[in-house]
Amino acid sequence: MIVRSDQRVTAGERVSSRVSEQRKIGFREAASIGIGGVVGAGIFVLSGTASARAGPAVIVAFALAFLASLSLAMCFAELSSMHEDSGGQYAYAKAHLPPIVATIVGWANMGAWISGAAFLGIGFGAHLHLVIPAIPPTLGASVLTAIIVVLNLFGLRLSGRVQFLIMLVEVGLLSVFIAFGSTDIEARHFSPFVAHGWFGILSAGVVGFIALLGWDAVVVAAEEIERPQQTIPSSIFASLSVVFLLYVGLLFVINGVLSPGQLDDTATPVADAAAVLLGPTGRTAVNVIIVVALTATVNSFVIVISRTAFVLARDGRAPSVVARCTAGGVPWVAIVFAGASQISMTVFSNLRFAVSATGFLYTITSVGAIAALFVSRRRGAAATFRTPLYPLTPAVALVLCFLLIVGAGVTGFVVGTLWLVFGVLCAAAIRRRSGRGIGRSARPASHGPPVV
């Protein structure tokens, strides 16, 4: 049975609500979704791209990106502690900012994750091909995405449990690799340290910011999480803490083992380092680990894209068909859309294009969230978590975001702007046809059962 979003306030809604409550996830699964969104495409695929831009100073670039992410995380933690609606940055903008800004933020967030799916698909396909040469990279990535889509159609609780198990294996094995690799570092690879100047560091910082994407994956699914106002902030900080330790260790090993020439635009930097350290057997073993880890990342991407698209459609800012759910509250059309968009980006996009577009669009969503925080504070909104050192922390996050927008370059600005214009025009056309103004949603976000 399929339920349209505008038909859910019925007797069937109460049944669907009970099913949804049983399928909600807790802190363990929520944190694993955040970790899985980061420890995947970012470090396994983009560390080579970032190193090519900054040289050994890529560690400084990632530190800058981490500070931006940490300051943003504090802002997100406060916002999530005052909202229970799905949608993440879009939900925050919708509650505190003008409607047109909310539309821009929502489409920017969806576009950022869709374009980011390109480097995720490219990375997974490349590593799977190294493990099983008979499988073409694009085909392997497409098949995995299709499998993940099917898994998500059974609900977030099942996919969340699978994600947690993958995280346990992944973090444990990567920790062993870092410990072993740290014993075979070549100091000559770190000289000169700032090989491409400070603009190179800034440019690599954009890549690092993108590589850290994922810790916020959990915020878009607030309606599917137990006690979201408490669980989401703690999940965000747990995700970032684990990711920070892994990133520092892996970047140190990668840059200490591989020469700058070897790191130049490689799609498999961690596997390349494993080959130097452990030979062909080590390369194969690490590639297997990476394939498993990227599977979790694909799952996080499907969750974010589908939930963002669902909420936009539910509010009349995207085609209404995307808001259709099963009787159990699973947004099946949005999930299929998420999978189809990921496969399309894997097949038709390229790494440089994806990095630039993702950086610009995601930074726009972050600016929107920061602006929402400033407005919510001015209005005296209640929150269970407060951003420390306010207003300095969000101000620092805002400045860093603008610097990262500059680092996204002309390609990111042009492609991102075209996507946002398309989104605004699409939302305006839909709402004009439905007879609603641009500032009115299809229904209040608090109505209806949570989706799973």
Image (tube, rainbow, N blue to C red):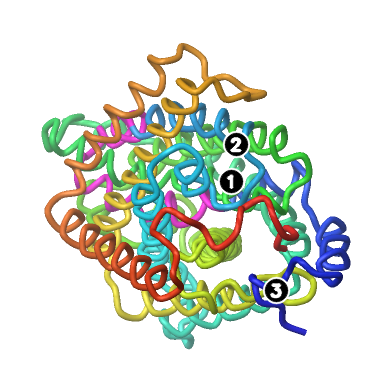
- Mark 2 residue type: Ser
Nearer the camera: disc 1 or disc 3: 3
Relative vertical location of residue 136 with respect to residue 81 in this rendering, above or below? below
On residue 282, the disc is none
Q: Is residue 194 visible?
A: yes
Which residue is at 75% across, 44% downward? 28
Count neighbours of disc 3 (C-alpha within 10 A) and say few if under 14, some if 14 to 19, many if 20 or more: few
Q: Quadrant of residue 425?
A: bottom left
SS at circle 2: helix
From the viewer's perspective, tell me whether residue 387 is left or right of residue 189. right
Question: Which residue is outermost to the bottom?
Answer: 134
Give, as a single range, the part of the protein colored magenta. 37-64
For the residue pair 146 and 429, the one nearer the viewer reads as 429
Mark 2 nearby-residue class (10 Å; few <14, some 14–19, many ≥20)? many
Q: From the top left corner, tell me how far across and down residue 408 is, in percent.
A: 21, 48
Q: Residue at x 26, y 54 (%)?
A: 262
Residues under numbered marks 2 and 1 in contact, where contact means CB atoms less than 8 Å apart: yes
Residue that mark 1 sits on: 219
Question: Which residue has dot 3 on it?
Answer: 7
Q: CA distance from mark 1 to mark 3?
A: 26 Å
Q: Nearer the viewer, residue 202 or 51?
A: 202
54 inside magenta stretch:
yes
**Quarter occupied by the N terminus:** bottom right
**From mark 2 to mark 1, how far is it between C-alphas?**
7 Å
Could you tell whether 78 is left or right of 228 in the image?
left
Q: Residue 299: x, y in percent?
A: 59, 64
Name the one closer to the observer, 325 or 296: 325
The residue singled out by tag 2 in the image is 80
| Residue type, label 3 | Gln
